């Protein structure tokens, strides 16, 4: 059940006392505020909303006391209900005979911040204002034995955690959130009202009873509205009821956006063409929505409400309210408390007497409050005349039952008899067993807390009735275990239409996304890429097969086209042109070296081994064509083997020359012994050994797992990308890593060789050639790893061409320059003397 009467602070005739001075100003101040604290053998704490509209929350920069601006008369009456129940028990000879209950009641202002301060005071050690910090609280004696209140669920969600840690019984007379039914989180929390779950069940049964299957549900944007609406949507799924619209309305009506939100809500309600609206909201947001509906001329509807706003003054204070249609809903069943109104009347008479007030203040001050007062100064300026209209219909029974539940538990814990109760120390947690297990009777009616620590007194179904111009709450049914409706008493002010339809028809390629958990209500949602709408009644998009694809909002799948680097692509033509240029340049260099094979520049560069290196570069250049066209397993395997062997053939010739330079410059004493093995004819043994080793590694690569064709369906939207996939990274790393090792050895053998003055330095060409190799490979790995398209093949071709051009440009082109343009330098003296000078310099 919703927090009944909670938001009636806007009932202007009774609540805004500061604006109704006509009667109140003339009153003599009373001592009513001194009636909410009394000493006793056992103290029961009370949390009640005496005030509302806190005035210092936004400007609060220091932890000062939270002050309420206006008096909330309902909260005052509930507090008086607690006082009445305790006074009644203290005068009883059957319940706690000989025991005097005390009470300590404080204002919550409907604010969690305001409720925390008295809650902390209740937890202080008895007789002090400090909370004891101990390892075991079994023998801890707090200030109060139990707590009554607060009223709102959001306040209880805060305070219940505090009291549950100490296992202090807390009995709320209004909190109805289903979250509070969690006994693991709130083991000592109880309530004398049904939970929202029971209310929602009643509303769903009402809808089903009348066959209303096309509805809207609206909740206030707070704990009650969101929680009740969530429960409602969860329960309504068990019936053939469609929720055409669900929304939240603002609770802060001072927000400039609140008016816009309310207008949008009414427009959406009108658009759905529903005739039934279920409204879970407090008084203020409910009033704002109804007023907005009237101003926008919304057609008459059936409004199903709850006690949160049904019993407010909306019907009596809103102009043209009858134009909204039919209003009916559920309020909690509550019997009147005998003698309460007379008790209040006597009390208001007494608080005007000086002698009574003096005695009250003495009793009030006997209890240490730690400087915290009841904070109900406005109570002293209110009269019985002011509260009489609300007193006559206020629901006091939940408060009365809450106090009696604690008293009966204490009665059993003490082991009381009709003769009296033993004087004993009772810890708060000892009451829980008796509250959980025993039934107690209040005014002839039996009560018992259920498994969720709540009571279920049932609901009354009421109708707003304007018969003969007079407004009344007309009972038309009730709900306990089942729903009973007296349909003959219900006179609808609007057509009772059963509409079962949705917002719009879904377009081809769209599916019905269930709205509100119900199959008959849906929004239309486009099927995403690679899925399609398969059948008319389907509520899910069907995924396409792996080799197929589909665009957004499709009704079928399409076969993916194969994607690789085609021969006729402009980029391929450009790469082939560059390949032809590179190949021609390599071949021309080889021809030039062959014609000048016996010249000093060719001999100093490696002699006839240069022809092998240039032939390998030419083959490497031609191998770039292997990356164009549709790949296959054999083609993928051939790519890597050809690349590795061609590169090894080139690098092995550089290795022989690099070792020769190292022996002559760094190890001249060993040169006569080892130099013949790296020069002249024996240098071919080094080349052959390198090639043989690479061939063995290539064989291992082919045996362990060569690259193979893989179809990549994820990288491209509508195509299948055919790529060569590495199956054995170990074999791949050994095969290409060996060439990298040769490159590192050549680089290390040559990069420290000093350039002789006016002599040609062969070592520099080798150093720069392998420096280019390292740079190209670093960029290749970084780019290749991030690409998922045909540009991977482009990257591989570009790497081969750049590597070929790099070696040609750094090692061979300078020598071609000497042969063609500087023939006067192509002498034995220019090349061999430089080595001789270096050798002599080192020997010295």
Image (tube, rainbow, N blue to C red):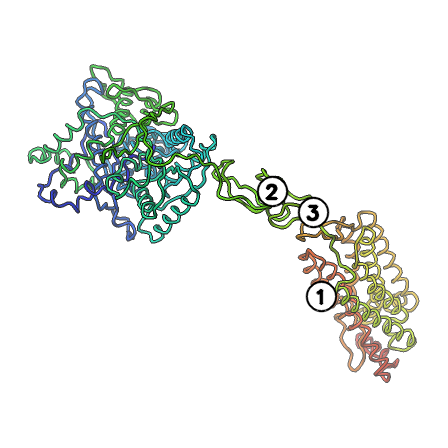
* 319 vs 639: above or below: above
The numbered mark, 3 or 1, whose residue comes first in the sequence reads: 3
Which residue is at the front of the view, 422 or 802? 802
Decide: few, some or many residues near mark 2? Use Cα within 10 Å; few <14, some 14-19, many ≥20.
many
The numbered mark, 2 or 1, whose residue comes first in the sequence reads: 2
Which residue is at the front of the view, 839 or 189? 189
* Quarter of the rendering occupied by the C terminus: bottom right
Instruction: Determine the CA span between mark 3 and mark 2.
Output: 15 Å
Which residue is at the front of the view, 673 or 208? 208
* Residue 639 drawn at (x, y percent): 81, 57
| Number of the label disc, if any, that sits on residue 541 | 2
Q: Determine whether label 3 and label 2 are within 8 Å by CB.
A: no
| Number of the label disc, if any, that sits on residue 492 | none
Q: Which residue is mark 1?
A: 775
Left or right of 503 in this view: 661? right
Q: Is residue 744 visible?
A: no
Instruction: Determine the CA span between mark 3 and mark 1.
Output: 40 Å
Left or right of 235 in this view: 435? left
Quadrant in which residue 456 is drawn: top left
* Quarter of the rendering occupied by the N terminus: top left
Q: Which residue is mark 3?
A: 548
* 673 vs 728: above or below: below
Instruction: Determine the CA span between mark 2 and mark 1.
Output: 49 Å
The numbered mark, 3 or 2, whose residue comes first in the sequence reads: 2
Q: Nearer the viewer, mark 2 or mark 1?
A: 2
* Residue 794 drawn at (x, y percent): 74, 61
Quadrant in which residue 158 is drawn: top left
Q: Is residue 388 visible?
A: yes
Decide: few, some or many residues near mark 3? Use Cα within 10 Å; few <14, some 14-19, many ≥20.
some
Q: Secondary structure at mark 3?
A: strand
Q: Secondary structure at mark 2?
A: loop
């Amino acid at each position: 059940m919703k927090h009944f009467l909670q938001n009636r602070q806007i009932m202007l005739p009774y609540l805004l006392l500061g604006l109704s001075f006509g009667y109140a100003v003339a009153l003599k101040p009373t001592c009513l505020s001194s009636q909410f604290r009394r000493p006793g053998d056992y103290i029961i704490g009370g949390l009640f909303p005496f005030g509302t509209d806190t005035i210092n929350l936004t400007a609060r920069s220091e932890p000062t006391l939270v002050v309420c601006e206006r008096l909330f008369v309902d909260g005052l009456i509930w507090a008086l209900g607690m006082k009445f129940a305790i006074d009644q028990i203290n005068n009883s000879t059957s319940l706690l005979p000989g025991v005097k209950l005390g009470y300590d009641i404080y204002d919550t202002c409907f604010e969690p911040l305001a409720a925390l301060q008295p809650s902390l005071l209740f937890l202080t050690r008895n007789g002090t204002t400090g909370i004891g910090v101990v390892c075991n609280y079994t023998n801890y004696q707090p200030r109060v034995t139990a707590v009554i209140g607060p009223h709102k669920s959001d306040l209880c969600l805060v305070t219940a955690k505090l009291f549950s840690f100490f296992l202090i019984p807390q009995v709320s007379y209004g909190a109805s959130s289903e979250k509070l039914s969690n006994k693991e989180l709130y083991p000592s929390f109880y309530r004398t009202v049904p939970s929202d779950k029971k209310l929602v069940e009643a509303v769903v049964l009402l809808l089903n009873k009348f066959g209303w299957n096309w509805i809207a549900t609206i909740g206030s944007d707070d704990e009650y509205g969101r929680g009740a609406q969530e429960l409602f949507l969860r329960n309504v799924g068990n019936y053939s009821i469609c929720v055409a619209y669900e929304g939240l309305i603002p609770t802060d009506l001072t927000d400039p956006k609140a008016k816009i939100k309310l207008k949008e809500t009414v427009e959406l309600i009108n658009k759905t063409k529903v005739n039934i609206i279920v409204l879970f909201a407090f008084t203020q947001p409910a009033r704002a929505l109804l007023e907005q509906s009237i101003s926008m001329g919304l057609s008459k509807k059936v409004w199903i409400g709850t006690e949160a706003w049904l019993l407010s003054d909306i019907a009596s204070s809103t102009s043209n309210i009858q134009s909204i249609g039919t209003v009916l809903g559920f309020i909690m069943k509550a019997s009147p408390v005998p003698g309460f109104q007379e008790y209040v009347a006597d009390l208001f008479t007494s608080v005007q007497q000086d002698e009574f007030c003096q005695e009250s203040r003495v009793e009030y001050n006997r209890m240490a409050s730690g400087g915290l007062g009841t904070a109900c100064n406005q109570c002293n300026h209110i009269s019985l005349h002011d509260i009489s209209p609300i007193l006559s219909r206020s629901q006091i029974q939940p408060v009365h039952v809450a106090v009696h539940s604690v008293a009966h538990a204490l009665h059993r814990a003490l082991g009381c008899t009709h003769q009296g109760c033993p004087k004993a120390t009772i810890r708060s947690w000892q009451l829980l067993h008796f509250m959980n297990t025993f039934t107690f009777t209040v005014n002839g009616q039996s009560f018992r807390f259920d498994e969720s620590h709540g009571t279920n007194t049932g609901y009354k179904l009421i109708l707003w009735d304007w018969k003969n111009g007079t407004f009344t709450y007309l009972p038309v049914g009730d709900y306990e275990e089942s729903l009973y409706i007296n349909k003959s008493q219900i006179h609808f002010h609007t057509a009772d239409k059963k509409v079962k339809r949705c917002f719009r028809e879904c377009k081809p390629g769209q599916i019905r996304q269930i709205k509100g958990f119900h199959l008959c209500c849906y929004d239309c949602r486009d099927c995403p890429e690679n899925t399609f709408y398969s059948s008319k009644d389907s509520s899910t998009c069907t995924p396409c097969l792996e080799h197929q694809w589909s665009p957004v909002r499709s009704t079928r799948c399409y076969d993916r086209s194969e994607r690789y680097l085609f021969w006729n692509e402009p980029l391929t033509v450009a790469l082939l042109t560059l390949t032809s240029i590179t190949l021609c340049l390599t071949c021309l260099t080889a021809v030039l070296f062959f014609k000048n094979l016996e010249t000093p520049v060719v001999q100093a560069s490696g002699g006839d081994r240069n022809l092998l290196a240039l032939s390998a570069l030419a083959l490497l250049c031609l191998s770039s064509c292997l990356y164009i066209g549709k790949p296959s397993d054999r083609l993928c395997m051939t790519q890597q083997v050809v690349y590795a062997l061609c590169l090894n053939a080139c690098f092995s010739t550089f290795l022989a020359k690099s070792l020769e330079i190292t022996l002559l410059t760094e190890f001249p004493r060993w040169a006569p012994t080892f130099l013949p093995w790296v020069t002249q004819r024996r240098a071919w043994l080094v080349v052959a050994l390198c090639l043989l080793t690479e061939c063995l590694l290539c064989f291992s690569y082919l045996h362990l797992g060569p690259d193979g064709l893989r179809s990549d369906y994820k990288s491209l939207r509508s195509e299948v990308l055919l790529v060569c996939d590495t199956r054995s990274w170990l074999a791949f790393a050994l095969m290409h890593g060996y060439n990298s090792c040769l490159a590192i050895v050549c680089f290390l053998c040559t990069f420290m060789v000093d350039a002789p003055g006016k002599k040609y330095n062969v070592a520099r060409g080798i150093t720069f050639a392998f420096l280019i190799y390292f740079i190209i490979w670093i960029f290749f790995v970084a780019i290749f790893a991030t690409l998922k398209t045909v540009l991977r093949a482009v990257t591989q071709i570009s790497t081969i061409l750049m590597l070929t051009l790099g070696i040609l440009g750094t090692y061979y082109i300078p020598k071609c320059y000497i042969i063609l343009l500087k023939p006067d330098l192509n002498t034995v003296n220019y090349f061999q003397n430089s080595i001789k000078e270096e050798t002599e310099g080192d020997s010295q």
